[in-house]
Amino acid sequence: MTDLSIIARMAPVYAERRARLAARIKRGIAIIPTAPERARNRDSHYPYRYDSYFYYLTGFIEPESVLVVIAGDQPKSVLFCRDKDVEREIWDGFRYGPQQAREVFGFDESHPVGELDARMPDLLANQPQLCCHLGSDEPWDARVLGWLNAVRAQVRNGVAAPEAISDVRTVLDDMRLVKDAHELDVMRRAAQISTTAHKRAMRAAAPGRAEYEIEAELLHEFRHGGAQAPAYTSIVAGGANACVLHYVQNDARLNAGDLLLIDAGCELDGYASDITRTFPVNGKFSAAQRDIYQLVLAAQAAAIAEVVPGSSWNAPHDAAVRVLAQGLIGFGLCQGSVDKVIESGDYRQFYMHRTGHWLGLDVHDAGEYKRDGAWRKLEPGMVLTVEPGCYIRPGAGVPAHFANIGIRIEDDVAVTATGNEVLTLAAPKTVADIEAWMRG
Ligand code: GLY
Ligand code: MN
Ligand code: MN
């Protein structure tokens, strides 16, 4: 069981978020359930992962929980959670129960989740607005509609049902996009564990070893560092496998003379890190590998330089594409002027994804990329990845020495008041630093 004093210290952080949600909604009621437990196969479940929105507002990680936030002149938050159950606790471990959960986590009210259906119609009665998320879980949608119908059935008693239904994620996405000091602290620690894991993997890689052996080194370091899980399935891709963007089989042997691309990051206390490093299996870049690597590194540097307050979301991508297009022309892989290669999209044969995404509780985190048709402006507290790459499949016009080179370099970058902070710098990235680290 987690140290209660730590949770009690954190409770005001979550209470402040609930208060902010209530203030943003102004009038009405928000219902945010956590994620269901999911069966993997008979009698066996996937490791439980709470819903990110629910966790953001509660810090509470037990399944079968629902948060209700009531906005208005006297905002309050109500938790529904599992009852204490001595018999189940013998099998599955500690559960708070409503009373202790309310005291420790600082809710205004709490009830057993078994009372949810009975209590929700009363909580919804006479509320002008219902903020929820519909459309991602049919049984949940049916339940919410059932409560609404139960309220509507009371209209002749003078009870009004909510007139408006809105998506609570719109407000929460916006809140989650700008990280507070607590979130940045956790993300720095997640990044630190993941950089250590990448360094361990670099040292472990050698010709003849299997990709899954290197994956095991990453997982070891994640758990050893206190992270609960990988934030996503690790990509450990040797040689040509690096040109498969979502390669996750991780079952091939590593060859001397090949590169190894590793895209892996841990999740710590709900927050993701997301790092890619690419390095030579035998510790020494070939000339062709070095050429393409330096190009991707230069593209990444140009992109990171654009991560400053006031910059457009798309500025890092545009900067990376310009550097890559120039380099691809230089290596004879694209023809014509830089502008023409960008305009025609010719570079996409070798760079077919975007340069980053928001990062936070979800690896591809919540938050709009455009607002009113225009790219969002970067603000202090936003965290994004910067991850240009170059993937050269064999084909017409591809010189043999470049064929099957796949490189991506990915860092996690927080926007600060004056520029940016690269959270993942500790993982070696220059050719010299990688080769020196691998020499040991
Ligand atoms: N690892 C997921 C991504 O880079 O987007
Ligand atoms: Mn990423
Ligand atoms: Mn990644």
Image: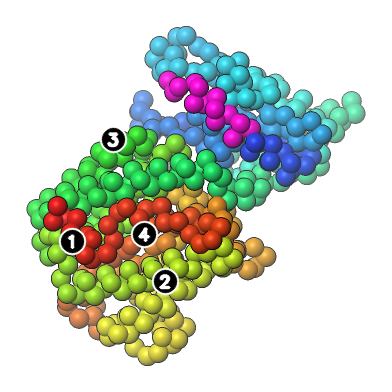
Q: Is mark 4 within 8 Å of ligand 3?
A: yes
The residue labelled by disc 4 is 410
Callout 2: helix, strand or loop? helix
Q: Is residue 138 above or below residue 406?
A: above
The x, y position of residue 365, in whole percent, is 50, 51
Give the residue number, with chain letter if any, for mark 2.
Answer: 302
Q: CA distance from mark 3 to mark 1?
A: 25 Å
Give me the residue at 79% from left, 30% from top. 74
Callout 2–callout 3 Cβ contact below 8 Å: no
Q: What amino acid is found at the position of numbered circle 2 in the picture?
A: Ala
**Residue located 62% across and 47% down the image:** 175
Crowd tier of the residue under label 2, counting other residues whose Cα lies within 10 Å: few below 14, some 14–19, many 20 or above: many
Q: Position of residue 430 (x, y in %)?
A: 27, 64
| Towards the viewer: 330 or 347 | 330
Q: Quadrant of residue 413?
A: bottom left
What residue would you read off at disc 1? 435
- Residue 224 is labelled as 3
Q: Is the residue under label 1 in contact with that under label 4 (CB below 8 Å)?
A: no
Q: CA distance from mark 1 to mark 2?
A: 23 Å
Left or right: residue 132 compared with residue 220: right
**Relative vertical location of residue 169 with respect to residue 418 in this rendering, above or below:** above
Which residue is nearer to you in this view: 216 or 395? 216
Q: Amino acid at mark 3?
A: His
**Residue extent of the magenta highlight:** 1-15
x, y percentage for residue 341? 41, 84
Earlier residue among tags 1 and 2: 2
Describe residue 396's horizontal placement relative to residue 192 as left or right. left
